[in-house]
Image (tube, helix red, strand yellow):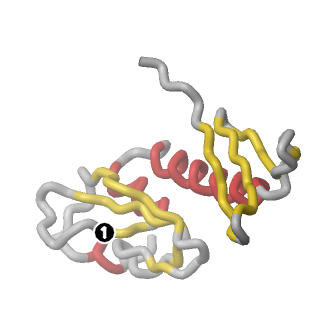
């Protein structure tokens, strides 16, 4: 069995009972897990513990799973972030249409976006779906 690294070996840091308060995609493998101090990470899970007063810790998926004892949530958050990256990458290559006024437009996720040039400046118009009240 390997020896714990980083805050895992610190007896003053709780190992269980953490919960996720936020998460972020760094865009590249540019972060380091603040719990184990060894894992390079792209997707950061910000974990909080009521008995840890030194602030939230930005950690990787495996440490987030172990800290929260939730072996589904961190994987689901990462899957969501990865899907968002893929969807954004494909957005511009979607099937744009030309409006009756000759402007480029696209409908996606219930929104309609129209791009047009007015007075030598590019503008956009966003039409949102109606909200159920």
Q: Is residue 97 above or below residue 42?
A: above
Question: Count of labels shown?
Answer: 1
Residue 26 left/right relative to 59: right
Residue 127 left/right relative to 52: right
Question: Mark 1 Cα within 10 Å, few/some/many (few <14, many 20+)?
Answer: many
Pick the quarter of the image with the C terminus.
Answer: top left
Residue under label 1: 57
Q: Residue at x 30, y 71 (%)?
A: 8
**Residue 29 position within the rendered picture, expressed as x and y whole percent measured from the top left:** 59, 77
**Residue 124 position within the rendered picture, expressed as x and y whole percent measured from the top left:** 66, 55
Outermost residue, front direction? Answer: 119
Q: Residue at x 12, y 68 (%)?
A: 53
**Residue 119 position within the rendered picture, expressed as x and y whole percent measured from the top left:** 70, 67
Closer to the camera in the image, 39 or 124: 124
Residue 127 left/right relative to 18: right
Q: Residue at x 59, y 30 (%)?
A: 129
Find numbered disc 1 in the image and state the secondary structure of the residue it sits on. Answer: strand
Closer to the camera in the image, 48 or 133: 133
**Residue 18 position within the rendered picture, expressed as x and y whole percent measured from the top left:** 27, 54
Q: Residue at x 49, y 43 (%)?
A: 72
Closer to the camera in the image, 79 or 86: 86
Pick the quarter of the image with the N terminus.
Answer: bottom left
Q: Is residue 54 above or below residue 17?
A: below
Q: Based on the displayed image, in which of its 4 quarters is residue 67 positioned?
A: bottom left
Closer to the camera in the image, 40 or 121: 121
Residue 56 left/right relative to 58: left
């Amino acid at each position: 069995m390997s020896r714990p690294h980083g805050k895992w070996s610190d007896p003053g840091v709780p190992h269980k009972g953490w919960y996720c308060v936020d998460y972020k995609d760094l865009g590249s493998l540019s972060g380091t897990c603040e719990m184990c101090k060894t894992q390079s990470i792209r997707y950061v899970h910000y974990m909080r513990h009521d008995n840890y007063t030194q602030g939230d810790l930005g950690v990787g998926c495996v440490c987030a799973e172990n800290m929260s004892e939730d072996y589904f949530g961190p994987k689901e958050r990462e899957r969501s972030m990865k899907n968002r990256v893929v969807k954004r990458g494909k957005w511009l290559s979607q099937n744009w249409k030309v409006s009756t006024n000759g402007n480029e437009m696209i409908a996606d996720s219930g929104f309609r976006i129209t791009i047009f040039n007015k007075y030598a400046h590019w503008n956009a118009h966003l039409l949102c779906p109606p909200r159920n009240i």
